[in-house]
Image (cartoon, grey):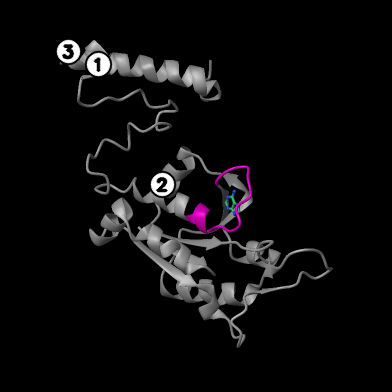
């Protein structure tokens, strides 16, 4: 999977993608994340990417020209499955949407800033708008990083254990069950006996029941009961 992120704050993303699983995924060739500085696509000598809103009002608006230049250059080089705009008024991100998007080959993600982008960008270039929650961030970079992380860890081979993404919370509309590791007894706080029993079917049953109980207690909205 290739992800092209368009931003006016590229440094904010560099360190995020330069570490841990995301860095290894790129080094192993599973994913390619390219961060594009919007200011490289403006004809303005001051490298401005925003201007005052027509009709007045507070805040600046991201201009269409640099965004169009960047998206068109990328689209001339390859075909993209989606051109995504990260925005609080987009579709709310959930695991089901991540799963669907993880089948993509090439994605563009545009990060908004200031008051947002000129509406014509949304009308003519954007194919999908995504929000990571009902709160407003100062820019779309963290949201783009959240989406990219959720996508990249689903690519086969990225996580060490091939099955571990499938047992995540939300993958089957249930929260994940409790997990434990050594020591089995920490200052008298012990691990449930069943996990030490070696009986795989009983362990599976226990985990399913725990996942159900946890989901019922914390996120009953996920259960169709
Ligand atoms: N940009 C600012 N706030 C955001 C949010 N909640 N989700 C996605 N992009 C955003």
Compare marks 2 and 1 and give the one earlier in the sequence. 2
Residue 179 image label: none
In the image: residue 69, left or right of residue 104: right
- In the rendered image, residue 58, in percent from the top left (x then y), is placed at 78, 63
Disc 3 and disc 1 in contact, CB within 8 angstroms: yes
Question: Which is closer to the viewer, label 2 or label 3?
Answer: 3
Residue 33 found in image quarter: bottom left
Q: At x 66% / y 65%, what residue is drawn?
A: 117
Measure the C-alpha gap from mark 2 to mark 3.
Answer: 34 Å
- Frontmost of labels 3 and 1 is 3
Residue beneath disc 1? 203
Left or right position of 106 against 218: left
Closer to the camera, 23 or 130? 23
Q: Is residue 141 magenta?
A: yes
The percent position of residue 11, horizontal first and vertical second, equals: 45, 67
Q: Check disc 3 and report the residue beneath it.
A: 197
- Bin the neighbour count of mark 1 within 10 Å (Cα to Cα): few under 14, some 14-19, many 20 and up: some
Q: Residue 81, relative to residue 38: is it above or below? A: above
* Mark 2 lies on residue: 150
Residue 35, image x, y percentages: 43, 68
Q: Say which quadrant the N terminus sits in.
A: bottom left
Span shown in magenta:
132-144
Tell me where residue 180 sits by quadrant: top left
Mark 2 and mark 3 lie on one chain; the one further toward the N terminus is 2
Q: Secondary structure at mark 3?
A: loop
Q: Secondary structure at mark 1?
A: helix
Q: CA distance from mark 2 to mark 1?
A: 28 Å
């Amino acid at each position: 999977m290739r992800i092209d992120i368009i931003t006016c704050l590229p440094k904010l993303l560099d360190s995020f993608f330069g570490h841990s699983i995301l860095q290894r995924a790129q080094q192993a060739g599973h994913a390619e994340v390219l961060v594009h500085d919007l200011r490289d696509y403006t004809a303005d000598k001051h490298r401005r990417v925003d201007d005052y809103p027509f009709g007045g009002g507070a805040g600046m608006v991201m201009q269409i020209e640099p965004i169009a230049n960047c998206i068109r250059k990328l689209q001339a080089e390859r075909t993209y499955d989606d051109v995504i705009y990260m925005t609080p008024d987009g579709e709310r991100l959930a695991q089901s949407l991540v799963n669907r998007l993880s089948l993509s080959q090439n994605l563009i993600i545009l990060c908004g800033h200031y008051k947002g982008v000129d509406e014509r960008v949304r009308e003519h270039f954007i194919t999908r708008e995504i929000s990571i929650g009902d709160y407003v961030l100062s820019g779309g970079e963290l949201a783009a990083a959240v989406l990219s992380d959720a996508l990249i860890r689903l690519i086969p081979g990225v996580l060490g254990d091939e099955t571990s993404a499938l047992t995540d919370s939300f993958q089957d509309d249930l929260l994940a069950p409790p997990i434990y590791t050594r020591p089995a007894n920490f200052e008298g706080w012990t691990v449930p006996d069943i996990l030490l029993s070696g009986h795989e079917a009983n362990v599976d049953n226990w985990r399913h029941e725990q996942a159900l109980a946890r989901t019922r207690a914390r996120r009953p909205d996920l259960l169709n009961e």
